Image (cartoon, rainbow, N blue to C red):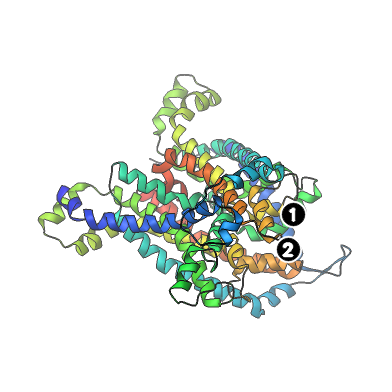
Amino acid sequence: MEKPLNNRAWFLVLPVLALVAFSAVLPLMTVVNYSVQDTFGNNQFFWAGLEWFQDTIHSDRVRAALGRQILFSAIILAIEIPLGIFVALNMPKKGAWASFCLVTMALPLLIPWNVVGTIWQVFGRVDIGLLGYTLTKLGIDYNYVNDALDAWITVVVMDVWHWTSLVALLCYAGLQSIPDAYYQAAKIDQASRWKVFRYIELPKMQGVLLIAVLLRFMDSFMIYTEPFVVTGGGPGNATTFLSIDLVKMAVGQFDLGPAAAFSLIYFLMILLISFVFYTVMTKEGETL
Amino acid sequence: MAAVAESKGRGAALVMALYLLFLMLPIYWLLNMSLKTNTEILGAFSLWPRNPTLENYRTILTDPSWYMGYVNSLIYVVMNTVISITVALPAAYAFSRYRFLGDKHLFFWLLTNRMAPAAVFALPFFQLYSSIGLFDTHIAVALAHCLFNVPLAVWILEGFMSGVPREIDETAYIDGYSFPRFFTRIFMPLIASGIGVAAFFCFMFSWVELLLSRTLTSVNAKPIAATMTRTVSASGLDWGVLAAAGILTIIPGALVIWFVRNYIAKGFALGRV
């Protein structure tokens, strides 16, 4: 059924528009303002044109951070999506055990992000952390503070720990919507477990899976707090992702111009992915 | 079906048990540490506290510089939730019921704000709220968090509202209900669970966020999350107190999670599952 056209509905949207304009457009305009100007202090600004944008695009530092960011997001997706599907397939369908699993799995999702960082910072320490201590006792040379690879592994495992449940819960919601009749038909046809997964479960999960991939990609692309608490972006710059680099530049060094240009480029990337996301989300809504 | 369920019974239970163990182990370790004294943490390595003590929790609950962090966090989180839901309700209704000029663009624009990296906004927010004299107040953080929570609330509520048949609205109007009366008396009770879920997610995302709340506060409205990070960097790390503070931040989420367990996927997927 088609929704009626009614432009007076704008009045209902007005409060949201005003609020979000205040908290999004206004700050964003400051960023735009800084991105095209240079300053020698004392609040004196000079027109700088596209200089900062050219600098940012050609900057090795930003490129390196972007490279690390893409690598990180790719690793995260490659681990969390299959693992999430696997866990969802093994979740009980109903009963007290199912509720228990749901609640326990959701717990990491509700922990403040810096506490997630703290948990893993402590957990991985060689002297007082269970993980670090055990690995050291097993004779593995593990130290996330000094070794870049160990730092990467720690941050990746932390993110897997933090967010795999989200993928699993989304897939679980998709699986719940499959009628029993499908499984019965598959059983009569003597379909193998793999075929049931490939031809019944996977197609039914397609929609939620797409949402899961996009959500995980977006959120990992903006990750800041957790790796910052665990590694502070180090050792060296090994785990300095885009957001961490940006905050270093803007708040740490107060390089307003370059940071603003960087922000806008970053924001445009996000905008592009958001558009894919939006198309997927609204299309799914129509077909469901 | 029963046979299928049974055949995957044992293996599935084992997989789940292992996965849950993986999830719980780091949290358990934090809990374990929070019940030890500093000498025990740094001295002997043990899987459980030998002399369990609540001393760390007592430190936090009696020291204003610690517990005010929780109070500050709760104040701005509640403010943010109330603001977000209040403005999102009519907007979500408009999106779910009508077409209007630019509705799709507006809906998309809201989404981009939910997806915007907080890092981009940290500095401009700092300057904006400093210039209007709101720096280090609860309302500043509450408003800043509206950036991602209002879009979230609109999307989630729209998802729930679209599940309510439009005939109900039309019948109510024919019966002579005015819009405000219909909305508060009939419509809101119908989507009560949706409002609950949206409120929960606003609460949660505001509670877990650190970057903006830390940037916008210094003393009076400093959230617990920021209090924790400062303690880490201070000399003489007090691991036990840090662990206890961490455990206390998990509690609000853990308390309400039971009520929203069936909606968690829906909430994270912006009401689209």
Q: Residue furthest right?
A: A42
Q: Is residue A166 above or below residue A94?
A: below
Q: Chain of mark 2?
A: A
| Residue B177: percent from left, percent from top | 50, 21
Nearer to us in this view, B166 or A104: A104
Q: Tell me the amino acid under the disc marked 2.
A: Val
Q: Tell me the amino acid under the disc marked 1.
A: Phe
Residue placed under numbered mark 2 in the picture? A251
| Residue B266: percent from left, percent from top | 42, 46
**Residue B183 as seen in the image, left or right of residue A172:** right
Nearer to us in this view, A278 or B16: B16
| Residue B175: percent from left, percent from top | 45, 19
Q: Is residue A208 visible?
A: no
Numbered badge on residue A15:
none
**Circle 2 SS class:** helix
Residue placed under numbered mark 1 in the picture? B126
What separation in Å lies between label 1 and label 2 (alpha carbons)?
A: 10 Å
Nearer to us in this view, A156 or B60: B60
Nearer to us in this view, A11 or A24: A24
The quadrant in which residue A196 appears is: bottom left
| Residue B249: percent from left, percent from top | 57, 47
Are the residues flagged by discs 1 and 2 from a single subunit? Answer: no
